Image (cartoon, helix red, strand yellow):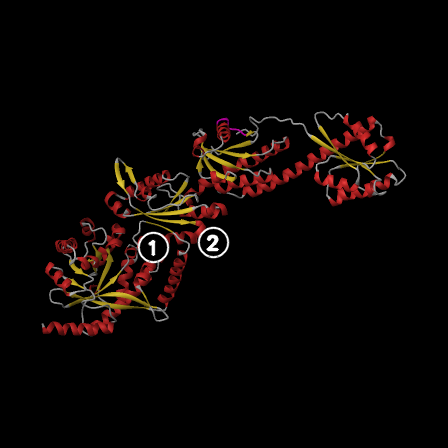
């Protein structure tokens, strides 16, 4: 990159201003007439006049760039001229302007006293100034003023560049670095209109393919768009193309462009374009060159830093941005960018099931294809982040567009061509405007987004837009989570037992253990509130362990009353896949002195399918030590013979929704019948939950269902009530 290549050499006529302050208008006219013939090369001379010290003060305030003041000493008062000198130097703070005193009364003050007490540059008697002498005095002082002005400009310019370089150099992120360059250019050169930074790969020399990576001022809406998609000014495209092809700066009016490259690191070209309302001076051209040289190395440094950061900020398998990158990106957003940015979190439904059928490699390939597809769905550039294995987050830099469910149909149900096969993907989406949660930090924002997505999935919606008012609900969930931690520590949870009976002879065959939580105010907190929260907050392991211990205690109490039936406990699918789960579960039973065959583990079908490959191995180990496995809510998820054979479970529990509808619709009755027959085919016992009527119980018995539970049989109850219920049920069965 040549810093000076293709740079126009400018020569413009400089303007020098001379002020004559004189109360004798006749003398002033003669003075100006003499100076009209002043020859100062290609400089233009502008003459200003004032006839009093007061009028002169006003003129100097309006024209701080006056080069020379020819000042009469005696005007409205004997020392009016001298007081004006004090005002210029001390009041206005103008130390550059040259001041030449002219007097017709030389005896008023000795020359030595004048030079010591007043900051003047020259002192002449009017009668001594001949035509040639006057021109010599004026030209000499103008040259001195120009020299001093240039020196001061250079000092100020270099100081500003040093300060700008310091502010820019600490930016190691490309977005922050380029935005900082624009801001400093606008500040140093007083560019109110603003500018853009374009980025393109070195082999893509077409300006239309360049991405506007940063923008400021009037061009801020261009950010995150490709130059070819913007209704931009043709001159901008021409200038970007010229820089990219010639690999050099192009300084012109009204647009100027600085060219940079980091080809040694990532093969990228950068073009910084700014618009200036005035024609650049030679001084500004020099300053721009120095500025360009100063920041040139920074692009390579930033590119190298970004390259080294890829391991921390990119998923090595898919090549997509990861969660760390997203947190950093949110941190680096300016206030304006934050107001114009949305987070679109997308969960890929059934990804685990797809990986079971097609392999894990297919899952990674699917996420790459999906990311590319999603990028093409939006007009403005977006960033795609692999937040979790099956979840993407899109950073959409566009606050002009509000998205409805209908408009996002092609986004939520994409069709992807992978290795010659078309795959239709179902996504669950949650859209959050950062403007609605602008007071939150990056980690809190991602926490809110994740919690909102979980809420959307729990409500079985396909898409939802976060409302600022929902933040209150999420905060309530957070408070409930904190309360749950304390409740677990203080043993505030307790269990209910719901009886399970044989549908053949109504004998008690076991109990399901159900956890309950009573708040400090005496009110009951519903399980469908705190159990999903425990699963998403990482507390489910502690809750499951607590329930297992209480279940073991209940087993021993039942045995003391000669009631020898197993108890089933619900375990989260995520818990089953933990490497230490089997050992922890066995240790708990041993510590409590309970045989393994007295405890059955229930895992819901939907949770099992998500962790199928890992779960099958661990569940098999549990079966090896005598612990039975029950698949809960069977039929509500993704029933498949292949995964049932992989799990080799002991029991299928028919989901309550089918039991509730089987006496109302023929279709649901057939589904129930099919599940019962499937269980028998696979040598599994079948139990129905949610039995609420005698008719349902009779129908299930006629279909061949082994056992059941529900409010018609017995509601969940405390252990003391469970003992009473068991004795009463035994007596009823004896009388039949």
Q: Are marks 2 and 1 in contact (CB under 8 Å)?
A: no
User: Quick check: can you spot residue 652?
Assistant: no
Q: Which residues are magenta?
A: 245-249
Q: Nearer the viewer, residue 523 or 709?
A: 523
Q: Is residue 520 above or below residue 226?
A: below
Which residue is at the front of the view, 432 or 722?
432
In this view, the residue in front, 354 or 337, is: 337
Q: Which disc, if any, is residue 455? A: 1
User: In what element is the residue under mark 2?
Assistant: loop
Question: Circle 2 sits on which residue?
Answer: 439
Quarter location, residue 585: bottom left
Say whether residue 176 is left or right of residue 462: right
| Picture residue at 14% right of the left edge, 68% below the top | 507
Q: Which mark is residue 7?
A: none
- Structural distance between the alpha carbons of marks 2 and 1: 22 Å
Q: Is residue 357 above or below residue 520?
A: above
Q: Position of residue 316 (x, y in %)?
A: 37, 42
Is residue 452 shown left or right of residue 224?
left
Most foreground residue, 510 or 37: 37
């Amino acid at each position: 990159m040549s810093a000076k290549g293709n740079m126009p050499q400018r020569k413009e006529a400089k303007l020098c201003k001379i002020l004559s302050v004189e109360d004798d208008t006749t003398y002033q006219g003669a003075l100006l007439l003499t100076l009209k013939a002043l020859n100062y090369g290609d400089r233009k001379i502008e003459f200003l006049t004032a006839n009093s010290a007061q009028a002169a003060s006003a003129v100097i305030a309006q024209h701080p760039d006056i080069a020379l003041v020819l000042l009469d000493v005696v005007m409205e008062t004997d020392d009016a001229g001298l007081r004006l000198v004090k005002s210029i130097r001390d009041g206005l703070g103008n130390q550059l302007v040259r001041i030449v005193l002219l007097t017709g009364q030389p005896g008023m003050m000795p020359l030595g006293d004048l030079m010591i007490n007043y900051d003047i540059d020259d002192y002449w008697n009017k009668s001594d100034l001949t035509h040639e002498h006057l021109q010599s005095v004026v030209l000499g002082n103008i040259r001195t003023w120009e020299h001093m002005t240039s020196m001061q400009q250079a000092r100020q310019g270099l100081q500003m560049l040093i300060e700008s370089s310091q502010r820019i150099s600490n930016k190691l992120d490309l977005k922050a670095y380029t935005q900082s360059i624009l801001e400093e250019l606008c500040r140093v050169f007083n560019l109110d209109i603003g500018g853009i930074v374009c980025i393109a790969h070195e082999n893509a020399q077409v300006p239309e393919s360049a991405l506007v990576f940063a923008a400021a001022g009037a061009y801020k809406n261009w950010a995150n768009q490709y130059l070819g998609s913007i209704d931009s000014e043709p001159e901008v495209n021409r200038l970007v193309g010229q820089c990219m092809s010639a690999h050099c700066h192009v300084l012109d009016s009204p647009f100027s462009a600085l060219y940079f490259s980091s080809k040694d690191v990532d093969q990228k070209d950068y073009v910084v374009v700014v618009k200036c309302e005035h024609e650049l001076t030679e001084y500004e051209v020099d300053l721009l060159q120095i500025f360009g040289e100063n920041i040139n190395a920074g692009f390579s440094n930033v590119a190298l830093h970004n390259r080294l950061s890829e391991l921390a900020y990119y998923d090595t398998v898919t090549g997509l941005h990861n969660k760390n990158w997203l947190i950093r990106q949110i941190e680096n957003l300016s206030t304006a960018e934050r107001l114009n940015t949305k987070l679109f979190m997308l969960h890929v439904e059934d990804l685990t099931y797809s990986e079971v059928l097609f392999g894990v490699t297919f899952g990674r390939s699917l996420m790459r294809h999906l990311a590319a597809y999603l990028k093409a769905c939006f007009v403005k550039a977006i960033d795609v982040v692999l937040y979790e294995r099956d979840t993407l987050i899109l950073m959409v830099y566009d606050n002009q567009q509000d998205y409805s469910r209908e408009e996002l149909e092609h986004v939520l149900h994409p069709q992807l061509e992978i290795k010659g096969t078309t795959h239709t993907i179902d996504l669950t989406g949650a859209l959050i405007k950062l403007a609605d949660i602008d007071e939150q930090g990056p980690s809190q924002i991602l926490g809110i987004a994740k919690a909102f997505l979980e809420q959307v999935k729990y409500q079985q919606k396909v898409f939802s837009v976060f409302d600022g008012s929902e933040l209150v609900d999420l905060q309530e969930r957070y408070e409930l989570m904190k309360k749950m931690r304390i409740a677990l520590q203080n043993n505030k949870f307790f269990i209910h037992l719901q009886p399970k009976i044989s549908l053949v002879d109504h004998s008690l065959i076991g109990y399901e253990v159900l956890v309950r939580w009573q708040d400090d105010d005496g009110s009951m907190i519903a399980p469908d509130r705190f159990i999903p929260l425990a699963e998403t907050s990482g507390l489910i392991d502690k809750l499951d362990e607590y329930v297992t211990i209480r279940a073991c205690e209940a087993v021993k109490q039942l045995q003391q009353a000669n009631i020898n039936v197993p108890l089933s406990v619900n375990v989260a699918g995520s818990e089953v896949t933990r490497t230490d789960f089997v050992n922890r579960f066995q240790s708990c039973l041993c510590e409590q002195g309970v045989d393994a065959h007295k405890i059955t583990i229930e895992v819901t079908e939907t949770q099992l399918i998500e962790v199928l490959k890992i779960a099958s191995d661990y569940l098999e180990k549990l079966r090896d030590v005598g612990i039975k496995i029950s698949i809960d809510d069977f039929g509500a998820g993704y029933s498949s013979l292949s995964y049932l054979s992989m799990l080799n479970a002991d029991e299928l529990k028919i989901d309550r929704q089918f039991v509730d509808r089987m006496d109302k619709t023929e279709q649901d009755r057939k589904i129930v019948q099919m599940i019962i027959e499937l269980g028998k085919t696979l040598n599994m016992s079948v139990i129905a939950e949610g039995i609420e009527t005698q008719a349902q119980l009779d129908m299930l018995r006629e279909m061949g269902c082994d056992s059941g539970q529900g409010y018609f049989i017995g509601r969940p109850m405390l252990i003391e009530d469970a003992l009473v219920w068991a004795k009463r049920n035994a007596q009823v069965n004896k009388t039949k």
